[in-house]
Image (cartoon, grey):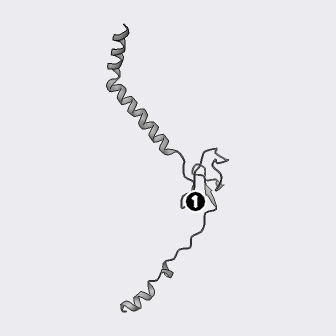
Amino acid sequence: MDKKDASKYNTREHTRINVVPIVTKKCPYCSNTLSLSETVCPSCKNKVGEPDKEGVAKIPGTWKKYVSALLALTILVLYLIYGRDVIAYIKSMFF
């Protein structure tokens, strides 16, 4: 088989995938089927986001949890490093 004959079989027709539009989404917590417009699952009362390519809704707001945890950890570390010095300085000013 030469290159001309092989090129007949490597067409886009053989690799085409039919894409089905997503009309519903599943809750990531309880797997309940929801409409695309719903933002709160009626059965488990958790917030849900937009669906991914499999149709499962994304969990919204996870980056906010990471940022708040990082901020709390930073405050704790700063307190452990500088907190005692600040408290001693404040005590020396007033007492």
Is 94 situated left or right of 56 in this image?
A: left
Q: Secondary structure at mark 1?
A: loop
Q: Across the whole image, how many numbered discs are drawn on residues?
A: 1
Q: Residue at x 56, y 73 (%)?
A: 18
Identify the residue at the far top of this view: 95
Label 1 neighbourhood size at 10 Å, few (<14), some (14-19), many (20+)? some
- Kind of residue at disc 1: Gly
The x and y percentages for residue 84 are 33, 20
Identify whether 93 is placed above or below 20. above
Identify whether 3 is placed above or below 81. below
Q: Residue at x 54, y 52 (%)?
A: 58
Q: Quadrant of residue 71?
A: top left
The x and y percentages for residue 26 are 61, 55
Identify the residue at the far front of this view: 93
Which residue corresponds to mark 1?
55
Q: Quadrant of residue 51?
A: bottom right
Is 75 situated left or right of 13 in this image?
A: left
The x and y percentages for residue 75 are 40, 30
Name the residue nearer the viewer: 43 or 90.
Answer: 90
